C-alpha cells in the first residue's frame, strides 16, 4: 500500500498551481517570503556597498601579492643583484727600470748596510765614466767591491783588509793613552813598553810632543777623561807594518788610479783615513754576497711565485755559468687549480653545492698548506724572440721565467698578468718610446672581475675573459700607465626598470618588486599582530570593567584615561632611538615595536567594549543567563562579547589601517623596522633625499601608493562592515 | 559648571601624575650607558655650555635618577611643579626657553591649517549630507577616506617632488630663503616665511581634513533625519532655511565640541611635518631631541603634550555644555 504524505501532496498541488498561474499566489505561501539568516543579511548589505567591495578586492589582491607573490617571484628580499659593467681604471703600470734591486746571494756574510744602500748612487757614478769596478772602504774596516758583471747586473763583494804600510804628510794616529790604566790602546801595532813609559812621562798639560826612538810624537787630550790621543808626526816615505816590500811596491802604490792595484800576485787597496795620510791594505779573497739588477722576473705561468733564491741564482747565472740549481714548484697544474679554487671560495662565501647528493667528491679538494718543491737545473739564455730578454728554462726545456728590464705590473703592484699581455703592452710602450708618442692603444682580452677585484671564473673553473680596449698613457719617459675598460662584476645599484626587474633595483642592489612584496608581508603582519594584541587586551579590560562595574570599572577606566593620554608617536620615537643605540637585532626590534604599539592602543577598544557591555548586561537575555546559573567567565565571553563582535570587527579593521600608517611612518623615520628586513616605510626612506627623490621616483611612488591603497582598503571595508552590521545607523 | 570644572581639573591633574609616572619610568629604565653616551655625544658638539658630567649631575639632581623609581619620580615632580625642567642637552638652553622660542612657529602652522580645514571640510561635509548618495556625496566620502589614509611622509614627499624639485616654486626645507631673507623688508620677511609655510600647511590640511569632513557629514545626516526637520519641511519652511537655521545649528553642537577640544592642540606641533619641511617649531625640536636622547627636553615635551591632551578633553566637555543648553554638567 502506498504511503500517504500530506505534505508532499500539498507541495505538489501548490507547485502545480504556481506553474499554471504564477500571478495567483497565496498570501500565506512560504515561497513569498525569503528569510535570510542574520549573517547572510549582513553579507548581502556588505556586497551592495561598492566602496566596500573595492576595498575587499584591493585587500585580497594585496594579500595575494604580499604572501603568495614571493613564492612565485624569483628574487628574495635581501638577494643582491649583480651585473657586468665596463669600468675604466688604471689597469697596469709599465716602467723602464733604472733602479737596481738587490738580492742577497750569500746570507751568511755580515756586511755594512750603508755600503749596500749606496749601491744605486754608486752605480749612477760609475755608469757615465764607464767604470766597471768600484772599491769602497766600509765603516766596519772591510773592503767592498762593486763589480759590473754585464749589462744591468752588478755584484757586490766583500774582502778583509790587512794594513801593510802607511805614507803621506798627514798625522797618523798611534793610539789612545790611558793615564789611569797606564796603558795604550793602539790603533794598529804595539810599540812596546818603552814607548808607554815615554808617553806616560811626557803627557802632561794640554798638548805637546815628545821624542821616542828617534821619532817625534804629538799628544792631545782625548775624548775620555785622563786620556791622550797619540799621533806620530808625519815623516817622509813609507812606514811598513810588516815586511818591507821595496821601491817597486812604493812606485805601484803612488801610481794607483782607482784605489786598488795588483802587486806581486796580491791585490792592494789604498785608503786615506785622514787628510794627507794614506794606508795601504792587502785585500783578502773577495766574497760576492749580493747581486744587483735592473731586470724583473716574469714567470711564464701567470702569477706563479718565484723564490728569492731562484731569482738571485738566475741573476748570477746570466753572465756567469749560464746554469744553476734551484727549487721549483713540483706541480704547476695543482697550483693553478688551487688559485682558481681560492678565488671561487672568496667570491661565493656560502657556496652551497646544489647537487643530487652531497658527495664528498663534490667538495673542494683539501688545500695543501705547503706546496712541494723539487730541485731542478735551470738554464739562462738570451731570448730568441725579444731583445734584451733572458729566458730561464727548466731542465726539460720548458721556459719557466723571463728577465726583462721593462717591467709590466698590475697598477696595484701585483704580478697577475699573463706573459702574452705583458708583451703586447711592452710592444706598444716600446713603439711609444721610439716615436716619443704620448698615448698608444691596444686591444686585448683580460679577465672579468668582481667589485673586490677578484677574478671571475665560470662553471669549469677557468677565467672569464673580456676583450678590452686599453690606452697607454705616458707619465714620464720611463713610466707608462695602461688604462683598461675592465668588465667588472658589480652590485647592480639603482637599476632602471627592466624585464628582469620590473621596478628596478634599490641602493643595495635588491630587487624593488621583491622588496615590495616582502615589505607588504611585514607591514600587514605588524598590522594584524598589533590589532589582535590590542583587541585582546581591550576586550579583557573593557569586559571586566563593563561587567563588574563599581571599583573594577573605576580602576580600569582610570587606566584607560591614562593610556588614552599617553602620546603614542613620541614614545615610539624614543623607543626606536633607544633600540637604534643598542644596535638590537632587527627581528627583536620588530617584536618590541609590535608589543609597544599594542600596549598603547588598547584603551580605545576597552572603552568601546565597556560601553556596549554596560548596555547589554541590563537586557533580558543576560538576566536569563544569570538565572540559569552560568559562571561569570562564560557569561562575559560567551554571551556578552559576541554581541560586541560587530563593533569590534569594525574597529579592528579601521585599526589595521592606522597601525600600518604608524608602522610605515616609524620605518620611514628609520626608527621602526630596519634593513635588511623590508617594509614599505623603509623603502621610501632609502630614496627620500632631495637628489634621490626625483631620480628614483619609480621606487618610492609605487610603494607610497601601495601604503595608501592598503590603508584606504581597510578603511572602506571597515566602513562597509559598520554599515552592514548596523543598517539603522547607516547614514 | 564651575564646580564641575574644578573637579575635572583636579581629576586631570591626577591622571597627569600617573601618565608622567609611566613616561618617567620609560626614561628611568633607559640603559645608563645609553644616557651617558648621548650626554657625551651632545656635550662634545660645538657650542656646548656644560660638560657631560655636569649634565648628568643636573639630571640626577633634578630628575632623581640615582634614587629609586618612586623617590626619583617625586624628585622630578617637585622640580616640575616649581617649573624647573632643566637644560636641554641638544639645544643648550633651558627647556622653557627652547619652548618659548619655538612654540609660535608651530602655533602659526596649526592655526592656519585649522582655519583652512574648517573652511574646506565643513561646507563639503554639509553638501555631501544634503545630497546623500549623489555623486558629490560619494566623491566627498572617497576623498575624505583617501585623506585619512595618506601617510604624512608620502604626501610631504610627493609635494616636495612636484612643487620643490620639478616646479621649483618652493624650497625643499627650511623656514626662510637664506640668500635673500636678510635683505628683505619686514613685510618681505613675513612673506618669505609664509611662502615656506605653504607646503607644510597643505600637508597637514590634507591629512586632517578627512576626519572633520566625515564627522560633519555624519552629524548633518543625523540631524536631517530627525523629526523636527521633517516637521519643519512639512509645515513648508523653505529648504534653505531648513538646512541653515534648523539643521546646521544643531550640527554645530558636536562640531564645536571637537573643534574646541582641538583648539588646545594648536600648540602641540607637528612632529613629522615640521621635521620633513625643516620648520623650526616645537615638533621638530622635540623630534630631534628624542632621536638625540636629550632626556630633559623629551620629558618636558611629553609632559606638555599630555597636559594638552587632558586640557583638550576638558575644553571639549565644557564646549559641549556651552553649545547645547540641554546638557547639564555634573
Image (spheres, helix red, strand yellow):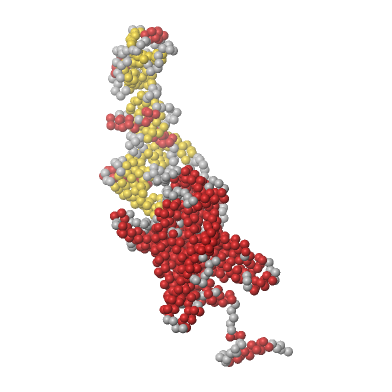
Residue for point 31% across, 32% down? A124
Quarter placement of the C terminus of chain B: bottom right
Residue at image position (46%, 37%) is A327
Against A449, is B170 above or below?
A: below
Where is residue B139? Give x, y as percent. Answer: 43, 73
Name the quadrant containing residue A430: top left
**Residue A598: quarter of image:** bottom right
| Residue A594 appearing in the image | no
Residue A693 visible? The answer is: yes
Question: Looking at the image, which is closer to me, B7 or A694?
Answer: B7
Q: Is residue B279 left or right of residue A714?
A: left
Q: Nearer the viewer, residue A395 or A621?
A: A621
Identify the residue at horizontal 35%, vertical 7% (top origin).
A213
Q: Measuring 34% from the left and 32% from the top, which residue is drawn there?
A: A120
Residue A731's x, y, as percent?
Answer: 50, 75
Q: Nearer the viewer, residue A29 or A612?
A: A612
Q: Furthest residue to the right?
A: A1
Report x, y in % for residue A214: 33, 7
Query: Residue A688: x percent and y percent?
Result: 41, 58
| In front of the other: A148 or A609 | A609
> Relative to residue A375, is residue A336 depicted above or below?
below
For this view, does A560 lie left or right of residue A666?
right
Q: Quadrant of residue A699?
A: bottom left
Amino acid at each position: 500500500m502506498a504511503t500517504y504524505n500530506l505534505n508532499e501532496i500539498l507541495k505538489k498541488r501548490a507547485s502545480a498551481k504556481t506553474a499554471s498561474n504564477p500571478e495567483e499566489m497565496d498570501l500565506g505561501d512560504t515561497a513569498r517570503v525569503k528569510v535570510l539568516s542574520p549573517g547572510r543579511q549582513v553579507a548581502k548589505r556588505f556586497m551592495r556597498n561598492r566602496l566596500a567591495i573595492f576595498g575587499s578586492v584591493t585587500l585580497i589582491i594585496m594579500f595575494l601579492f604580499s604572501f603568495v607573490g614571493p613564492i612565485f617571484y624569483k628574487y628574495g628580499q635581501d638577494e643582491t643583484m649583480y651585473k657586468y659593467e665596463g669600468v675604466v681604471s688604471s689597469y697596469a703600470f709599465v716602467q723602464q727600470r733604472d733602479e737596481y734591486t738587490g738580492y742577497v746571494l750569500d746570507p751568511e756574510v755580515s756586511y755594512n748596510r750603508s755600503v749596500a744602500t749606496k749601491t744605486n748612487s754608486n752605480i749612477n757614478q760609475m755608469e757615465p765614466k764607464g767604470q766597471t769596478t768600484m772599491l769602497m772602504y766600509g765603516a766596519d774596516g772591510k773592503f767592498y767591491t762593486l763589480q759590473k758583471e754585464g749589462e744591468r747586473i752588478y755584484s757586490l763583494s766583500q774582502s778583509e783588509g790587512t794594513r801593510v804600510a802607511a805614507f803621506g804628510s798627514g798625522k797618523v794616529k798611534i793610539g789612545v793613552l790611558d793615564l789611569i790604566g797606564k796603558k795604550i790602546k793602539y790603533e794598529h801595532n804595539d810599540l812596546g813598553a818603552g814607548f808607554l813609559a815615554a808617553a806616560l812621562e811626557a803627557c802632561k798639560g794640554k798638548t805637546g810632543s815628545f821624542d821616542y826612538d828617534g821619532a817625534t810624537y804629538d799628544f792631545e787630550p782625548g775624548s775620555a777623561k785622563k786620556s791622550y790621543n797619540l799621533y806620530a808626526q808625519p815623516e817622509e816615505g813609507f812606514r811598513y807594518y810588516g815586511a818591507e816590500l821595496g821601491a817597486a811596491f812604493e812606485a805601484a802604490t803612488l801610481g794607483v788610479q782607482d784605489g786598488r792595484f795588483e802587486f806581486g800576485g796580491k791585490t792592494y787597496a789604498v785608503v786615506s783615513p785622514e787628510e794627507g795620510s794614506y794606508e795601504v791594505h792587502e785585500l783578502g779573497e773577495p766574497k760576492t754576497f749580493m747581486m744587483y739588477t735592473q731586470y724583473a722576473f716574469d714567470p711564464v705561468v701567470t702569477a706563479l711565485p718565484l723564490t728569492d733564491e731562484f731569482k738571485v741564482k738566475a741573476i748570477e747565472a746570466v753572465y756567469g755559468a749560464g746554469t744553476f740549481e734551484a727549487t721549483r714548484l713540483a706541480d704547476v697544474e695543482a697550483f693553478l687549480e688551487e688559485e682558481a679554487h681560492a678565488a671561487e671560495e672568496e667570491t661565493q662565501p656560502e657556496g652551497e653545492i646544489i647537487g643530487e647528493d652531497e658527495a664528498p667528491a663534490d667538495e673542494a679538494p683539501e688545500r695543501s698548506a705547503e706546496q712541494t718543491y723539487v730541485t731542478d737545473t735551470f738554464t739562462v739564455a738570451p731570448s730568441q724572440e725579444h731583445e734584451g730578454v733572458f729566458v730561464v728554462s727548466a731542465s726539460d726545456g720548458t721556459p719557466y721565467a723571463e728577465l726583462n728590464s721593462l717591467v709590466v705590473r698590475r697598477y696595484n703592484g701585483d704580478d697577475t698578468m699573463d706573459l702574452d699581455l705583458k708583451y703586447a703592452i711592452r710592444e706598444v710602450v716600446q713603439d711609444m718610446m721610439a716615436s716619443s708618442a704620448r698615448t698608444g692603444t691596444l686591444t686585448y682580452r683580460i679577465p672579468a672581475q668582481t667589485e673586490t677585484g677578484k677574478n671571475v671564473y665560470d662553471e669549469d673553473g677557468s677565467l672569464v675573459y673580456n676583450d678590452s680596449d686599453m690606452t697607454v698613457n705616458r707619465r714620464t719617459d720611463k713610466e707608462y700607465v695602461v688604462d683598461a675598460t675592465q668588465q667588472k662584476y658589480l652590485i647592480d645599484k639603482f637599476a632602471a626598470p627592466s624585464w628582469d626587474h620590473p621596478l628596478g633595483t634599490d641602493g643595495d642592489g635588491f630587487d624593488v618588486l621583491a622588496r615590495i612584496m616582502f615589505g607588504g608581508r611585514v607591514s600587514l603582519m605588524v598590522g594584524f599582530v598589533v590589532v589582535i594584541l590590542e583587541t585582546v587586551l581591550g576586550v579583557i579590560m573593557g569586559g571586566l570593567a563593563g561587567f563588574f562595574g563599581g571599583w573594577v570599572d573605576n580602576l580600569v577606566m582610570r587606566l584607560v584615561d591614562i593610556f588614552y593620554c599617553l602620546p603614542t608617536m613620541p614614545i615610539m620615537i624614543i623607543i626606536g632611538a633607544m633600540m637604534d643605540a643598542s644596535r638590537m637585532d632587527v627581528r627583536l626590534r620588530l617584536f618590541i615595536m609590535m608589543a609597544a604599539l599594542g600596549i598603547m592602543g588598547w584603551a580605545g577598544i576597552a572603552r568601546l567594549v565597556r560601553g556596549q557591555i554596560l548596555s547589554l548586561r541590563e537586557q533580558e537575555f543576560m538576566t536569563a543567563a544569570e538565572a540559569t546559573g552560568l559562571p561569570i567567565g562564560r557569561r562575559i565571553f560567551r554571551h556578552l562579547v559576541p554581541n560586541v563582535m560587530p563593533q569590534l570587527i569594525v574597529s579592528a579593521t579601521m585599526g589595521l589601517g592606522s597601525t600600518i600608517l604608524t608602522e610605515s611612518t616609524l620605518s620611514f623615520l628609520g626608527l621602526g623596522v630596519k634593513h635588511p628586513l623590508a617594509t614599505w616605510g623603509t623603502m621610501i626612506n632609502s630614496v627620500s633625499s632631495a637628489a634621490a627623490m626625483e631620480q628614483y621616483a619609480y621606487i618610492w611612488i609605487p610603494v607610497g601608493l601601495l601604503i595608501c591603497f592598503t590603508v584606504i582598503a581597510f578603511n572602506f571595508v571597515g566602513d562597509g562592515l559598520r554599515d552592514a552590521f548596523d543598517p539603522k545607523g547607516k547614514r | 559648571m564651575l564646580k564641575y570644572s574644578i573637579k575635572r581639573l583636579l581629576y586631570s591633574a591626577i591622571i597627569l601624575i600617573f601618565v608622567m609616572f609611566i613616561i618617567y619610568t620609560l626614561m628611568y629604565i633607559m640603559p645608563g650607558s645609553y644616557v651617558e653616551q648621548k650626554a657625551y655625544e651632545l656635550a662634545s658638539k660645538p657650542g656646548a655650555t656644560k660638560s657631560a658630567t655636569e649634565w648628568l649631575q643636573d639630571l640626577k639632581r633634578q630628575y632623581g635618577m640615582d634614587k629609586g623609581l618612586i623617590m626619583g619620580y617625586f624628585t622630578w615632580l617637585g622640580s616640575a611643579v616649581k617649573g624647573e625642567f632643566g637644560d636641554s642637552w641638544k639645544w643648550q638652553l633651558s627647556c622653557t626657553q627652547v619652548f618659548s622660542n619655538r612654540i609660535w612657529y608651530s602655533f602659526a602652522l596649526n592655526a592656519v591649517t585649522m582655519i583652512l580645514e574648517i573652511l574646506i571640510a565643513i561646507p563639503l561635509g554639509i553638501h555631501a549630507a544634503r545630497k546623500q548618495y549623489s555623486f558629490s556625496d560619494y566623491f566627498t566620502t572617497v576623498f575624505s577616506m583617501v585623506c585619512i589614509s595618506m601617510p604624512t611622509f608620502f604626501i610631504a614627499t610627493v609635494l616636495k617632488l612636484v612643487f620643490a624639485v620639478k616646479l621649483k616654486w618652493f624650497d625643499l626645507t627650511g623656514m626662510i630663503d637664506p640668500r635673500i631673507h636678510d635683505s628683505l623688508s619686514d613685510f618681505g620677511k613675513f612673506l618669505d616665511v609664509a611662502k615656506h609655510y605653504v607646503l607644510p600647511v597643505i600637508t597637514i590640511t590634507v591629512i586632517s581634513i578627512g576626519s572633520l569632513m566625515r564627522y560633519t557629514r555624519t552629524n548633518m545626516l543625523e540631524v536631517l533625519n530627525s523629526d523636527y526637520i521633517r516637521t519643519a519641511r512639512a509645515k513648508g519652511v523653505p529648504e534653505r532655511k531648513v538646512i541653515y537655521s534648523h539643521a546646521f545649528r544643531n550640527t554645530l553642537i558636536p562640531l564645536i565640541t571637537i573643534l574646541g577640544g582641538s583648539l588646545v592642540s594648536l600648540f602641540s606641533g607637528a612632529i613629522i611635518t615640521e621635521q620633513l619641511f625643516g620648520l623650526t617649531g616645537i615638533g621638530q625640536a622635540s623630534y630631534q631631541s628624542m632621536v638625540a636622547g636629550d632626556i630633559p627636553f623629551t620629558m618636558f615635551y611629553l609632559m606638555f603634550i599630555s597636559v594638552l591632551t587632558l586640557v583638550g578633553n576638558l575644553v571639549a566637555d565644557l564646549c559641549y555644555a556651552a553649545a547645547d543648553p540641554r546638557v547639564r554638567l555634573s
